[in-house]
C-alpha cells in the first residue's frame, strides 16, 4: 500500500471514530442511561455517588480519532506529539471542572461559564487564527468540511452536559411528536418573516442554483450533521439552555422566599432585632419588646422566654387559624393581597416533580393548538434575545466590519431568534437544527445568499486534510 493510501485510510478511520460519540448520544435513551450510569446509587438507593472514572475514559475515547487525524496529516513529524497533548488538554479541562463542581450549585455559575468558554472560545478564535491544531476533511466541492475541532467540541459538550453535569432540556434526540413538527413549521415561518425582507431589501439574496434533487437532499443532510447540529448544540443546547435555567432558578428562589415560606405550617410571626436582643448574653430586654429572658431556678444554663401579652395573643390567633384549617382541610388557601404573590401562588399548583420546560408549561400548551406556537413567559423572550445576540456576535466576521457585515449580523440575529424560538418550544435541539439547516441550505443554494449563516465551515486552514471525492 502506498504511503498516500495509508494516510487516507487512517484519515477516514479517524473520521468514523470522530462521528461515533456524536451519533451514539442521538439514540433513544442513550443520554438517560449515560447520566444514570455516571450518577450511581447504592443497592438500597440511600447514597448517591459519581463514577469519576467515566469522564476520564470518555476523554481518551474522544482523543483517539484526533490522534488518527493528526497522524494522517503528518506521519513523520515529532510535532504531532505536542499537537496531541494540546488537544487532549482542551478535551480534559472542561470535564475536570464539571467533575468537581458541586451538584447543588445554581445553573450558569462560574463553573458552567468557564466550561462553556473552554469549549466554545477555541472554535470561535480559530475563525481568525488557529490556536489549536485543526484537521479539516473535504468531502466534495461546495460541501461543508468535516472539522476535527468542531466535532470534538460537540463530543466533549455532550459528555459534560448529558452525563457529568446534565442539562435536561438539551433535547439531543430523534424522537419527535406532532407538536414538534408544528413548531418546526412555525420556526420556518418566523425565519421567513424575519429574514426575507432583510435579504431582499439589502440585495443580499439573489437567484441561485440548487442542482439536482438527489444531490440537494444529500447536501442538506451534510449541512444538518456538520453545520446545524454543532451550531445548535453549542448556542441553543448549552448557552441559551443555561441562560433559561439561570432565570428560572432565580424565579424559583424568589417564589420560595416570598410565597412558599409563608405557607409553611406553624411559622411564628417574624421578629426584628429588638426582639432577638434579649437572647444575646449580657443584654437586657428593651421596654416594649416582645420577650424577656430570665434564668430557670436552679439551672443557670437554661433560659426561659417570657412572652408579653401581644405575643401571647398572636400565638393564640395562629393556633386558632391552624385549628380551623384542620377542621376544614378542603378550604382553599387565602388569596394573597399582592398581585405578584397571587401570580406565583398559581404556579405552586404544578407538580413538584417537574423537570423540563415542556412539563412546566403543559397546562398552557394543552389549551389549544395556537398555544403550541407561543412562549408564555416574558423572561423566556428576554433570554431568547440575549442568546441570539451572543450567536450573532460570535459568528460575525470582525476582521472586516462594513455595511455588508452589518447585514450579516442582522441576519444572524434573526436566525438566532427563529432557531431559539423553535428550541424553546420543543426542548429539542434537533428540531432547531432542522430549522437552521433548511434556512442555511435554502439561503445559500436556492436564494444564492453570499453570506455564511453557520459556523464558518468554508474557512481555509493552513494545515487541512483535503480528500475530495467527486
Image (cartoon, rainbow, N blue to C red):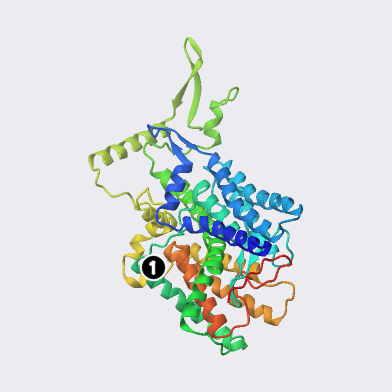
Residue 428 location, quadrant? bottom left
Residue 74 location, quadrant? bottom right
Residue 418 seen in the figure: no
| Residue 385 % position (x, y) | 56, 68
SS assignment at label 1:
helix
| Residue 57 % position (x, y) | 56, 44
Count of marks placed on residues: 1
Identity of the residue furthest to the top in this view = 298
Left or right: 446 as drawn, with respect to 334: right
| Label 1 CA crowd tier, 10 Å (few <14, some 14–19, many 20+) | many
Q: Residue at x 65, y 53 (%)?
A: 67
Residue 242, above or below 147: above
Which residue bears the numbered disc 1? 180
Q: Quadrant of the N terminus?
A: bottom right
Q: Residue at x 49, y 12 (%)?
A: 299
Q: Along the line of sight, which residue is nearer the eye, 193 or 281? A: 193
Left or right: 375 as drawn, with respect to 416: left
Q: Quadrant of the C terminus?
A: bottom right
Residue 23, above or below 188: above
| Residue 140 % position (x, y) | 59, 75
Amino acid at each position: 500500500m502506498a504511503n498516500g493510501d495509508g494516510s487516507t485510510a487512517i484519515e477516514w478511520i479517524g473520521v468514523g471514530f470522530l462521528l461515533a460519540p456524536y451519533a451514539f448520544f442521538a439514540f433513544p435513551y442513550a443520554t438517560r442511561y449515560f447520566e444514570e450510569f455516571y450518577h450511581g446509587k447504592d443497592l438500597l438507593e440511600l447514597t448517591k455517588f459519581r463514577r469519576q472514572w467515566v469522564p476520564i475514559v470518555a476523554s481518551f475515547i474522544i482523543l483517539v480519532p484526533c490522534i488518527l487525524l493528526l497522524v494522517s496529516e503528518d506521519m513523520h513529524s515529532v510535532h504531532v506529539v505536542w499537537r496531541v497533548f494540546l488537544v487532549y488538554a482542551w478535551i480534559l479541562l472542561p470535564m475536570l471542572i464539571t467533575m468537581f463542581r458541586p451538584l447543588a450549585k445554581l445553573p450558569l455559575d462560574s463553573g458552567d461559564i468557564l466550561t462553556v468558554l473552554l469549549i466554545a472560545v477555541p472554535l470561535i478564535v480559530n475563525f481568525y487564527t488557529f490556536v489549536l491544531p485543526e484537521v479539516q476533511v473535504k468531502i466534495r466541492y461546495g460541501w461543508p468540511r468535516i472539522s476535527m475541532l468542531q466535532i470534538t467540541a460537540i463530543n466533549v459538550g455532550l459528555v459534560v452536559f448529558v452525563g457529568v453535569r446534565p442539562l435536561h432540556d438539551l433535547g439531543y434526540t430523534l424522537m419527535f411528536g406532532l407538536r414538534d413538527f408544528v413548531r418546526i413549521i412555525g420556526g420556518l415561518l418566523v425565519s421567513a418573516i424575519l429574514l426575507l425582507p432583510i435579504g431582499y431589501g439589502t440585495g443580499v439574496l439573489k437567484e441561485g442554483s440548487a442542482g439536482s434533487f438527489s444531490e440537494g437532499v444529500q447536501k442538506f443532510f451534510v449541512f444538518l450533521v456538520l453545520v446545524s447540529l454543532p451550531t445548535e448544540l453549542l448556542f441553543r443546547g448549552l448557552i441559551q439552555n443555561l441562560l433559561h435555567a439561570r432565570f428560572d432558578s432565580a424565579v424559583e428562589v424568589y417564589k420560595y422566599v416570598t410565597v412558599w415560606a409563608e405557607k409553611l405550617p406553624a411559622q411564628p410571626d417574624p421578629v426584628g432585632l429588638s426582639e432577638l436582643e434579649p437572647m444575646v448574653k449580657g443584654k437586657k430586654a428593651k421596654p416594649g419588646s416582645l420577650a424577656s429572658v430570665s434564668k430557670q431556678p436552679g439551672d443557670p444554663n437554661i433560659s426561659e422566654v417570657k412572652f408579653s401579652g401581644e405575643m401571647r395573643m398572636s400565638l393564640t390567633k395562629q393556633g386558632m387559624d391552624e385549628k380551623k384549617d384542620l377542621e376544614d382541610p378542603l378550604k382553599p388557601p387565602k388569596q394573597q393581597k399582592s398581585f405578584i404573590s397571587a401570580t406565583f401562588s398559581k404556579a405552586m399548583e404544578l407538580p413538584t416533580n417537574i423537570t423540563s420546560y415542556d412539563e412546566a408549561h403543559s397546562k398552557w400548551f394543552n389549551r389549544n393548538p395556537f398555544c403550541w406556537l407561543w412562549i408564555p413567559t416574558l423572561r423566556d423572550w428576554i433570554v431568547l434575545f440575549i442568546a441570539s445576540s451572543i450567536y450573532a456576535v460570535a459568528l460575525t466576521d470582525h476582521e472586516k466590519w462594513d455595511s455588508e457585515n452589518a447585514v450579516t449580523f442582522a441576519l444572524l440575529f434573526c436566525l438566532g431568534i427563529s432557531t431559539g424560538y423553535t428550541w424553546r418550544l420543543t426542548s429539542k435541539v434537533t428540531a432547531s437544527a432542522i430549522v437552521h439547516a433548511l434556512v442555511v441550505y435554502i439561503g445559500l443554494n436556492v436564494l444564492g445568499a453570499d453570506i455564511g449563516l453557520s459556523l464558518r465551515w468554508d474557512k481555509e486552514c493552513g494545515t487541512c486534510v483535503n480528500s475530495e471525492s467527486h
